Image: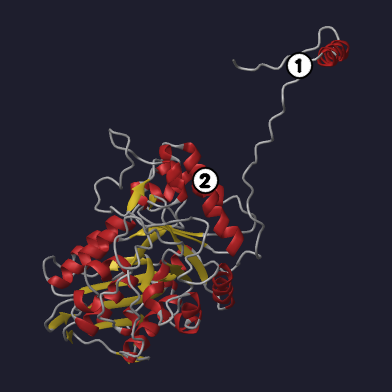
Amino acid sequence: MKYIAMPSKMTFVYAILALSFSFFDCKKGDDPVPPTKPPVQQPVDPPVYAAPYQGIPDTKDVVMYEVNLRGFSAEGNFKGVQNRLDQIKDLGVNVIWLMPINPVGQLKSAGGLGSPYAVKNYKEVNPEFGTLEDFRTLVKEAHNRNMAVVIDWVANHTAWDNPWIANKNWYKQDASGNIIPPPNTNWTDVAALDYNNQDMRKEMIRSMKYWVLATNIDGFRCDAADLMPYDFWKQAIDTLKKFDNRKLVLLAEGSRANHFNAGFQLNYGWDYYKTLKDVFKGTQADATLFTTNAQELTNIPEGFTKLRFTTNHDETAWDDTPMGLFSGKKGSMAAFVLASYMGGSTLLYNGQEVGSTKKLSFFEHDPIDWTTNPDMVVEYKKLIAFKNGSDAVKRGSIETIADPSIVVFKRIYNGKEVLVIVNANNSAVTYNVPTSVSSASWSNVMKNEDMALGATLTLQPYDYYILSKK
């Protein structure tokens, strides 16, 4: 038989007393007081780390230099970039763009060290590159040399091991409810974010604000910007513009016209780059460059423009270097003249200034050899220095001069004229110089000497002339 203990008399007495006290303590009509919930913790921005940099260039004055940290130096880190800031500055650069600096995801990695575009955490520094303090020092030292710093921002997708993945509704999903990579891509190492989710949007913008405030960066190059909705970019940029006394450089990797309405000052001159390659291959006429140039730049609001280039990290890694695409040293320099002098702002990718032929990966540590082709470094410096000092080249109207064999145009601004003549062919050509051109007095910019033009001018393969009207 199971034993059951019975309560004592004293137990009953204590129970009656407790009930009595409870009865007399409650006043007639009182309701029980519900437990109070702890206050909801609102996200707080980090404190402002340093005074905003005041040297942000006007959009048409931008000379941007892209850094692939894994290829830039033997160290492969922030300090490796810091050690070469003087060399970057000497090129005439005023904005440094660093490829993504965040930790890289390892789950479903694309191989090697993983893609820097597979972001594991939006508010941390990749330890491969150094510490947060190392990065802050790099930014400070760039500012000390009158260069702004922008970082690559990957807002379209995250790594599969990013903590955000716990919020399944922040991501695009298939019919079975599985998170998916970005549609219509082969980017299986990343998970596509869903911009219908407002909570995710807010956290993305908070993450962007973090880097501005906590490290004093000067803007963002926004990756795959065409894949995200206009209204998100407008929301993000409107928020970033609320900072006091702070101007940012905002570059969209994309070509949509509404990027400018969203607030980006720059987007990519993809069409011009593709036409430039075709002209040098001989599959399109030289004059096509003028058509593409006009199509890209027409109707862009004042204060905005295209970023023009002969390479970037994607093109060098997956296609070829300027040395390969444009037939060596002379061809790559001629292509750079056309890309930087016909319109838009200028981009350089690390290594092109020394004529690197390495198809630089951004999945591996593969340092650039900075000792090659010092003559090209000198040539790039001269070309950029003249453009930096010429409002005609940066802001002038363009006057095209028709010729079936070469590219000839003027840039004109406030009475100043610059004449550009480029042979984009792998054969010598003779230019029949119009009287309106030959009758003027010109100075050869690259040789710093006067140059008289006769009735004809013979140009060897990939020769070019930049002449300033006296």
Q: Can the viewer see residue 469?
A: no
Position of the C terminus by quadrant: bottom left
Labels 2 and 1: the sequence-earlier one: 1
Looking at this view, is 230 or 433 the one in front? Answer: 230
Percent of width and height locating residue 264: 44, 54
Of the 4 image quadrants, the one containing the N terminus is top right
Q: At label 2, which amino acid type do we have?
A: Glu
Q: Position of residue 330 (x, y in %)?
A: 23, 84
- Tell me the residue at 32%/35% (across/down): 177
Residue drawn at (20%, 74%), measured in percent from left and top? Answer: 325
Residue 92 locus on image (x, y percent):
45, 79
Q: Which residue is mark 2?
A: 203
Q: Nearer the viewer, residue 466 or 57?
A: 57
Q: Quadrant of residue 183?
A: top left
| Residue for badge 1 | 32
Q: Quadrant of residue 146?
A: bottom right
Q: Residue at x 44, y 68 (%)?
A: 98
Residue depicted at 16% across the width and 80% down the height = 431
Q: Quadrant of residue 20?
A: top right
Residue 76: give x, y in percent of width and height.
42, 77
In this rendering, the answer to whether 222 lies above or below 139 is above
Secondary structure of the residue carrying tag 2 is: helix
In this view, 239 is above or below 345: above
Q: Give above or below for 374 relative to 178.
A: below
Amino acid type of the residue tagged 1 in the rendering: Pro
Residue closer to the observer: 262 or 162:
162
Q: Nearer the viewer, mark 2 or mark 1?
A: 1
Residues at marks 2 and 1, CA–CA distance in whole angstroms? 39 Å
